[in-house]
Image (cartoon, rainbow, N blue to C red):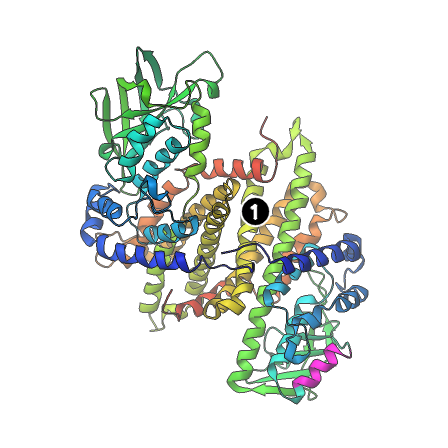
Amino acid sequence: MDLNPSEEQQQLTDAFAAFYAKECPIERVRDAEPSGHDADLWARLCEMGVLDMAVDHASGGWGASLLDLALVAEQHGRHLGPAPLVEGQVAVRLLARAGGQAAADALSRSLVDGRLTTIALHPPRSGELALVPAGAVADQVIFYDGSRLMCMEIGDRRVISNLGSMPVADITVDSSATELGRGGQAQQLFELARDEWMVLMANALLGIGDRSMELGVEYVKERRAFGAPIGSFQAVAHGLADAATAVDGGRLIAREAAWAADEDAERATELACFSCGFCSEAAGEASYRSLHYHGGYGFMLEFDTQLYYRRAKAWPAVFGEPSQMFARGAAHRLIRTDR
Amino acid sequence: MMMDFRLGERSETFRAEARRFLDEHLTDEVRERMHATGVHHNWDFHRARVEHGLLAPGWPEELGGQGRDPLEVQACLEEFQRAGAPTYAVGTTLMVANIIRHIGTDEQKQLIIPRALGGEILIVLGFTEPESGSDVAAAQTRAVRDGSEWLINGQKMFTTNAQEADYVFLLTRTNTEVSKHKGLTTFLVPLRQPGVEIQPVFTLSGERTNLTFYSDARVDDSLRIGEVDGGWQVMTVGLTFERTGPQGGDSVRLLRAMEEWALNSTDDAGRSKAEDPDVQARLGRAAAENEVSLLLARRCAWLQNAGALPGVEGSMAKLFASEALTRQSADFVDMLGPDGVRGDGDPAAVGGGIAEYYFRFAMGTITYGGTSEIQRNIIAQRGLGLPRPA
């Protein structure tokens, strides 16, 4: 057992921590509201190689593991990166796995031509893909229609104003969509992509939770009431202790889920679901505590804690609520014989 | 080194050994006797552990252990906990033996450690009193010097397994003239003597514990642990040991039973409960929490393996696992519907009434070994650096 990132992974983490600290201060996050997309930041991230690293060597990428990407996603979450990191990486990984000319063309458009590709997390209903992450800014979208995996240049879209200042959109499926695959294999590719999205989201959420804790703890050490720092009151301290425990536990399960993608195939899907459900709630708890312990200031837009509170709820919600993630994980777990 | 969430091959081999042992020695008879008496200790099982080297596998070989590393010990104890084996008396005995190993006299080490690890004696804890629990240092039980001995007078609560044990590790007040932390002394008091009275107390989980009364009970000064009035330093060492160890084994047991129920039950329309989204959500939430409990506990073992002493990490593991069991057991009683209230005497009770049993049992776990509130204080103050209450 070793819970420390490898030396290379630590270097990767440090590099992205430094990048986000410099390129993505909180003012930049505010400036990108309400669209939730900073095109310049995204360009810089692509220069850093966030898409290339996500793709395997055989498809011309750098072959990072999901765990490597998870460590980057945590930094992204910590800084509330207004850029489609998770969706972008998941989409190119799917295209690299899919095989076939249509997928290779779409991958080339993403990596070489800089056409942003995203993925719809749910099949279309009545010809419409709802709340597609990065759908407001992407050029092409991958979706699964119940039997076929498709890729489509986005035409008709409706940008949705939303809780988390995310660049999401409802997208109309049109006849220009091309098929990437069908049948069991297409479904497997789609499910694997959803698992990867959940794992990276879990890690991003834990970054949100971790930073929320820092803001909250910092504040309650300084702010005084009744002649003492409010952090000395158990009513405050105990809420933060619970949230800190959830965030620590969340980090462990989020990283384990990423590790399992390569090392524990049998449990990979259930851990993806469990980690995302758990980290959704852990980030929710931490950001809620942080905001509330700021008192009235937490309610003011000027204070940063609300930025975390809204995203902790909204980012994972485009997939589903935690209960759905837990249910999905349980369904996978129940068919295993060696529970 | 690469990140790795497995305990490792040696640990898994040892886990398999522990499982074989449990299959053979944790018999229905042992379980039934625990259930009937409320005593979670069994001497036959205890001695079998010793024979198989499974009582104190983490201790050095020269002291009667196997020299196993903390990850191996973790794997072994996970199995004991998941199986519902009686382990509490071993835990208290080894905790006190460990204190003696670190700060005891040579004479104490020779007297206690071989017999404790040899399965001959048990040591129980005497901290809590009628007027003090979490505020451990407020203990009022008096110890007064009488020649080469000390005379003990007072009362302790929750002296679990005292009726089976040889010694109680007793926290006493030896000085009332100084602040409360500075007037404490710890002793290893022999339980089988006229001045000690043991009165059984039955608890919500059916488990028996005790009140113990000390009326001019005697203990030789050679069984004083640590300095006179230096009891708080001894306790600081001891309480750290108390919070490490496996967590969440009870939740694993409970979840397995609930999953079996889901797989083998149908609703009125004949649909499997395992496909009911509400059931799945409850089972999945518990499974996620159990994974987190396991990881938080394993993190402690991993830190110990690297030579560190987990403090805040141990509090997080204990807090999370016990609170999770409390939530889950209540949730599963709900999930089973009206049948959830059926007790273990009822043949129709799901899993032998395991959900309602843990619904009762869990309330002990968020109290003993340091209440959830005490763990939160530790996490807030030592982990987050928040100021202490004025």
Q: Is the N terminus of chain B in the top left, top right, bottom left or bottom right quadrant?
A: bottom right
Badge 1 density bin: few <14, some 14–19, many ≥20, Cα 10 Å:
many
The answer to whether residue A190 of the structure is visible from this angle is yes
The residue shown at (75%, 72%) is A137
Q: How many callouts does the rendering have?
A: 1
Residue B365 highlighted magenta (yes or no): no
Q: Position of residue A309 (x, y in %)?
A: 66, 52
The residue shown at (59%, 64%) is A67
Q: Is the C terminus of chain B in the top left, top right, bottom left or bottom right quadrant?
A: top right
Residue range in magenta is A103-113
Identify the secondary structure beneath mark 1. helix
Q: Where does label 1 land, which residue?
A: A243
Q: Nearer the viewer, residue B119 or B390?
A: B119
Q: Nearer the viewer, residue A150 or B250?
A: B250
Is residue B62 found left or right of A1 in the rendered image?
Answer: left
Is residue A298 found left or right of B362 in the rendered image?
Answer: right
Is residue B88 found left or right of A134 in the rendered image?
Answer: left
Mainly helix, strand or loop, the magenta region?
A: helix
Q: Position of residue B276 (x, y in %)?
A: 41, 68
The residue shown at (63%, 69%) is A64
Q: Nearer the viewer, residue B172 or B228?
A: B228
Q: Position of residue A305 (x, y in %)?
A: 69, 48
Q: Is residue A299 above or below residue B288?
A: above
Residue A111 highlighted magenta (yes or no): yes
